[in-house]
């Protein structure tokens, strides 16, 4: 037993001496997460800078402007008024506003009957969503009027005499749309970018330690120190166990540092620190299993480095470490569940949105455990096949 | 291959190898090797490259499992799994096997811990070994900052930390500068004097002659002779060793010499391939015949040396080939 | 010429290395696919739909209209809980819960509230709500019309609803029409046309850095020392190596360009300009790689720091996400790395039909980077080779 600890302690000492190890597991993820946090300043997620040109100068146009400035839309929509359409066009072209609404002359009148030009939304190819929003707000604004008109037209189509149209219109004007939208806010915390990307980048770089551990084994072999250890009265598994312990400690330290720094310096939040710890421990165990797998598959240091890199990138790509999970397709999200880091990220996402305890980390822990067990089984099989010549 | 091993009082012998054999695929590396080492004895395993020395060593140290035969150290069986026997063996591999990014002391401490030395005793032993290998002043320096010779000394020191009963050194002086080599040979002599049993493999005859109480000559996996250096030389007692320096078609000449009746062994050698070594009975009477043969084959003999036989001659006599290619 | 001998030796070694091939071809393509599939649909709000268990025709019609709305990307969820979870995980901007008994309520003349769940502090949610409101309003208009017509003329609700659908044009509604003013995008197009050029920039750089590891290794094995013992000037060695890595970078670039065009239908724009950009970027990468080969002490250092550096610079330069979404100061800061200029140039070529003249400034900046890197690299490597103890 003490041999196992001696080997683990030696390994850790070597890694602590290695500056590149520090960079990749502690420095790089922290810096990159910080960069991401800076880039995605959470609260400015979606903004629509809209311009409005009031060619109508009537109450309806003013009403529309007021809707744009209403309290519900305050965080989202910023309005600028332009005197002329040409000014608004220029503004959209240069990007000063994302889109502009041009209220035509006669708009207020048209609300009381009579045709009119359409309201135009000037948009830019790059800001489809904002233009969409401008259209939607305008459409909602005129919805009641359009509904009233439709009601009259339908009544006529159903057989009401055309001569009754003015009375119909008057009665229709008293109607109110039978369906409306009611918003309700979710009680949980919104997911902060750093709460996702901190652990994501931490995991990405911690997975690199698979390469360190695997290469280290072959370096010992090449160096002859593996023989020295074999010549000593230590159990056969002691070497592998000792290296596993050191890999575990090292990976866990890396993950702990990243999550801690994300929390302390970049304001990441997770509902349940115990859950964060559990996920980190599970990932560290998984790294150990993957290291053993790589060692059992290759024969030289270079091969170890190569295979480890491939494994890391494959897992990270599938698991969604590089993209905000919300942005991917459901297909990719399902694929991510074939990777341990994909599960872990799901756990961190749930923790980051206020879910605690087993609800948040239960399924991810099971997913990571299942993956690790599979890896261990394959490794054991490979070692058995190797041993029987 | 498993002849019944007679069991004398093996607890008195430090090492007992019985009928060791090992193949790698089609190649037989070690074929029925038996040897034993008494306490305090320095035993040399002498043979050319590829003779099976390292394979035998690895089986002795429990790094390789034999296909047949047994190894016992102080009566305890040695196997590839951990055993109490390994506690008694100190292994010094041929190439330096140390951690370059750890310090001298850290290396010694680590290897000592593998042998379960309690902390205080470990520290004491590390200090003792540092004195022994004269690296006390460099104790805190990283191994990769040491010179080659120092690393060799540390390489040996790492095998000594746990005060082994049997020290196994695999060709410790290959590629080593003369100064360090001298130091190593001195140390081994000292270990022997202090009562440690030593198993020493080499292909340098001078070392075997100088250091070893007994020598086993191994060639192509078989132990062809065993005994004190003197006993072995006596095997070729009435032989002479003839060394010719010559120019010409020496390959053909050597083959031709070998076919002569009174030549027991012939081999080419020398740093420039200009040496022919022969083991013959009564060199002086054979000399004219050798010179005639040279003349016939258009070989120009530059010098002739006639010597008392040594271990190299023994080897040549026993195997027909040279100790050093 | 000895430099060419060095070049071919290095090339042979790399091309035989399977891991190198993985990183040069397979991995970039895989990432291109993943990111290409992801980076799309920036012009639609993501809405989850929860439909009623027993939905009548009116409810189903509302659902269908939400699904077909051009501004919304909808996905139906079996239960409200699933949809809420998706919303919580930021996979959606809003969740629309179509109420049970919609049909019954509407026919009975009652008002219906369609619940929309959002993240209160997320602003995309409110945008989505507005879009959903517009669709609901249009649907509600028909219901209102049907009820009204029913009251006025006594026709059945369903008949009136059918009439209402047909009457929309006759009612001459006030319409909202879109007019695109700025047709030239400032960003790379979406999907694969985004990921392929950005990953080209990122990977050529990262793989060139990895090439530096090979140079470090060669230094350590003393092969260079051997070569220098022969009558080979250090300058020649450095030149040979640089050419080798430049060729590898260009090869990789051509592979990605080819695959992008053939498989992902990426339009790379003006061939002359694209060619110039590919070449200049390959030079930048090569300079960085050879510099890494000169400066780092062990291959492990390169493998450790290389990806981190490459990814960090890629992020700063807009390879992982468009710089348009970051704060202005960060966008400016990002132009301290060459990646940003390369991405800008590709944007001009792909989104604005630029030609060589249009990217002259970007090319100039990149050429300056390349020159500085290669000069520094040559000097450092030469110094390492000629003064280091066994380098």
Image: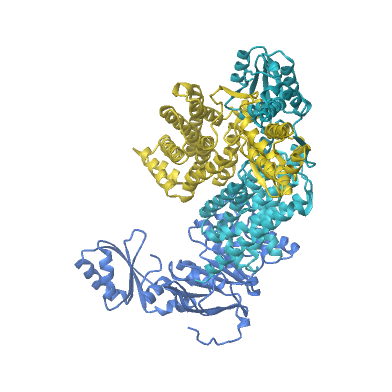
The quadrant holding residue C143 is top right
Residue B296 x %, y %? 19, 68
Which of the pair C388/B152 is nearer the observer? Answer: C388
Which of the pair B140/A326 is nearer the observer? Answer: A326
- Name above or below for residue B160 compared with residue A117: below
The quadrant holding residue A217 is bottom right
- Image point 60% across, 68% down: which residue? A231
Residue B28 x %, y %? 43, 74
Which of the pair A80/A161 is nearer the observer? Answer: A161
Query: Among all residues in the image, which is located at the extreme left?
Result: B296
- Image point 21% across, 70% down: which residue? B292
- For chain A, give the colour: cyan
The quadrant holding residue A96 is top right
* Number of marks: 0
- Name above or below for residue A373 compared with residue C13: below
Residue C380 x %, y %? 51, 34
Describe residue C223's horizontal placement relative to residue A14 as left or right: left
- Name above or below for residue A317 compared with residue B112: above
Indicate the chain coloured blue by its letter. B
Indicate the chain coloured yellow by its letter. C
- The colour scheme applied to this rendered structure is by chain
Describe residue C387's horizontal placement relative to residue B103 as left or right: left
């Amino acid at each position: 037993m003490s041999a196992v600890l001696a080997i683990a302690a030696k390994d850790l000492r070597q890694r602590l001496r290695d500056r590149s190890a520090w960079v990749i597991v502690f420095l790089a993820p922290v810096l990159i997460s910080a960069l991401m946090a800076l880039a995605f300043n959470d609260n400015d997620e979606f903004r629509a800078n809209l311009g409005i040109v009031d060619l109508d100068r009537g109450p309806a146009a003013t009403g529309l402007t007021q809707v744009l400035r209403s309290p519900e839309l305050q965080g989202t929509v910023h309005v600028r008024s332009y005197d002329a359409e040409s000014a608004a066009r220029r503004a959209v072209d240069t990007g000063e506003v994302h889109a502009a609404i041009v209220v035509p002359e006669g708009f207020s009148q048209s609300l009381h009957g009579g045709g009119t030009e359409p309201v135009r939304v000037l948009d830019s190819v790059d800001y489809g969503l904002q233009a969409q929003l401008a259209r939607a707000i305008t459409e909602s604004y005129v919805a009641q009027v359009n509904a009233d008109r439709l009601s009259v037209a339908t009544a006529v189509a159903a057989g009401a005499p055309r001569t009754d149209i003015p009375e119909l219109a008057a009665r229709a004007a008293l109607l109110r749309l039978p369906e409306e939208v009611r918003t309700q806010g979710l009680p949980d915390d919104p997911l902060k970018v750093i709460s996702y990307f901190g652990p994501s980048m931490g995991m990405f770089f911690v997975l690199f330690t698979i390469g360190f551990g695997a290469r280290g084994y072959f370096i010992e072999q090449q160096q002859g120190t593996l023989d020295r250890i074999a010549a000593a009265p230590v159990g056969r598994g002691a070497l592998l166990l000792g290296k596993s312990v050191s890999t575990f400690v090292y990976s866990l330290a890396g993950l702990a540092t990243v999550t801690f720094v994300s929390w302390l310096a970049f304001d990441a939040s997770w509902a349940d620190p115990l859950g964060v710890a559990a996920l980190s421990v599970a990932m560290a165990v998984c790294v150990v299993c993957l290291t053993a797998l790589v060692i059992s598959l290759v024969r030289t240091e270079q091969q170890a480095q190569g295979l480890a890199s491939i494994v890391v990138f494959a897992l990270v790509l599938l698991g969604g470490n590089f993209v905000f999970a919300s942005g991917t397709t459901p297909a990719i999200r399902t694929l991510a569940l074939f990777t341990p880091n994909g599960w872990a990220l799901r756990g961190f996402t749930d923790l980051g949105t206020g879910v605690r305890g087993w609800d948040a980390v239960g399924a991810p822990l099971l997913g990571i455990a299942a993956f690790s067990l599979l890896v261990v089984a394959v490794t054991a099989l490979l070692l058995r096949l190797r041993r029987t010549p | 291959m498993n002849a019944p091993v007679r069991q004398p009082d093996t607890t008195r012998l430090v090492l007992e190898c019985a009928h060791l054999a090992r193949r790698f695929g089609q190649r037989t590396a070690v074929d029925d090797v038996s040897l034993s080492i008494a306490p305090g004895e320095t035993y040399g395993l002498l043979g050319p490259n590829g003779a099976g020395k390292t394979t035998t060593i690895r089986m002795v140290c429990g790094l390789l499992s034999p296909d047949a035969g047994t190894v016992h150290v102080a009566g305890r069986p040695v196997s590839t799994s951990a055993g109490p026997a390994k506690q008694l063996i100190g292994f010094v591999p041929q190439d330096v096997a140390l951690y370059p990014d750890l310090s001298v002391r850290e290396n010694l401490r680590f290897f000592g811990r593998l042998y379960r030395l309690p902390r205080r005793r470990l520290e004491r032993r590390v200090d003792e070994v540092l004195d022994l290998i004269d690296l006390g002043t460099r104790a805190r320096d990283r191994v990769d900052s040491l010179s080659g010779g120092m690393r060799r000394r540390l390489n040996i020191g790492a095998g000594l930390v746990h005060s082994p009963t049997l020290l196994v050194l695999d060709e410790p002086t290959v590629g080593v500068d003369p100064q360090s080599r001298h130091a190593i040979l001195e140390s081994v002599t000292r270990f022997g004097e202090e009562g440690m049993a030593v198993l020493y493999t080499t292909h340098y005859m001078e070392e075997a002659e100088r250091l070893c109480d007994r020598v086993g000559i191994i060639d192509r996996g078989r132990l062809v002779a065993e005994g004190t250096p003197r006993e072995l030389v006596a095997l070729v007692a009435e032989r002479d060793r003839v060394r010719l320096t010559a120019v010409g078609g020496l390959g053909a000449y050597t083959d031709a010499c070998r076919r002569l009746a009174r030549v027991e062994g012939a081999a080419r050698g020398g740093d420039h391939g200009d040496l022919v070594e022969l083991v013959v009975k009564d060199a002086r009477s054979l000399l004219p015949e050798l010179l005639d043969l040279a003349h016939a084959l258009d070989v120009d003999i530059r010098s002739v040396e006639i010597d008392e036989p040594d271990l190299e001659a023994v080897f040549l006599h026993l195997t027909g080939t040279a100790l050093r290619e | 010429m000895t430099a060419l001998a060095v070049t071919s030796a290095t090339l042979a070694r790399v091309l035989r290395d399977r891991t190198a091939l993985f990183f040069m071809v397979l991995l970039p393509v895989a990432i291109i696919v993943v990111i290409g599939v992801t980076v799309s649909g920036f012009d639609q709000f993501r809405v989850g739909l929860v439909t009623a268990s027993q939905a009548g025709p009116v409810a189903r019609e509302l659902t269908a209209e939400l699904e077909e709305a051009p501004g919304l990307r909808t996905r139906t969820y079996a239960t409200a809980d699933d949809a809420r979870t998706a919303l919580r995980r930021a996979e959606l901007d809003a969740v629309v819960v179509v109420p049970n008994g919609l049909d019954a309520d509407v026919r009975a003349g009652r008002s219906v509230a369609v619940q929309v769940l959002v993240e209160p502090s997320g602003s995309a949610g409110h945008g989505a709500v507005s879009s959903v409101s517009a669709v609901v309003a249009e649907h509600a208009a028909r219901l209102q019309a049907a009820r009204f017509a029913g009251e006025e003329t006594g026709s059945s609700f369903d008949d009136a609803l059918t009439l209402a659908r047909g009457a929309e044009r006759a009612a001459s509604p006030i319409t909202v029409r879109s007019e695109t003013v700025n047709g030239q995008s400032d960003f790379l197009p979406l999907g694969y046309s985004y990921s392929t050029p950005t990953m080209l920039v990122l990977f050529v750089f990262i793989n060139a850095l990895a090439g530096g590891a090979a140079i470090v290794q060669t230094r350590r094995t003393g092969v260079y020392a051997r070569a220098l013992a022969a009558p080979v000037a250090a300058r020649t060695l450095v030149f040979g190596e640089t050419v080798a890595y430049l060729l590898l970078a260009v090869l990789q670039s051509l592979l990605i360009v080819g695959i992008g065009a053939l498989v992902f239908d990426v339009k790379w724009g003006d061939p002359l300009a694209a060619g110039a950009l590919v070449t200049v970027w390959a030079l930048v990468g090569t300079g960085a790689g050879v510099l890494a080969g000169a400066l780092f002490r062990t291959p492990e250092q390169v493998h450790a720091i290389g990806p981190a550096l490459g990814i960090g610079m890629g992020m700063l330069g807009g390879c992982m996400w468009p710089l348009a979404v970051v704060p202005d100061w960060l966008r400016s800061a990002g132009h301290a790395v060459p990646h940003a200029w390369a991405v800008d140039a590709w944007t001009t070529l792909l989104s604005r039909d630029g030609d060589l003249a249009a990217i002259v400034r970007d090319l100039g900046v990149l050429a300056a980077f390349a020159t500085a890197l290669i000069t520094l690299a040559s000097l450092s490597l030469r110094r390492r080779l000629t003064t280091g103890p066994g380098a």
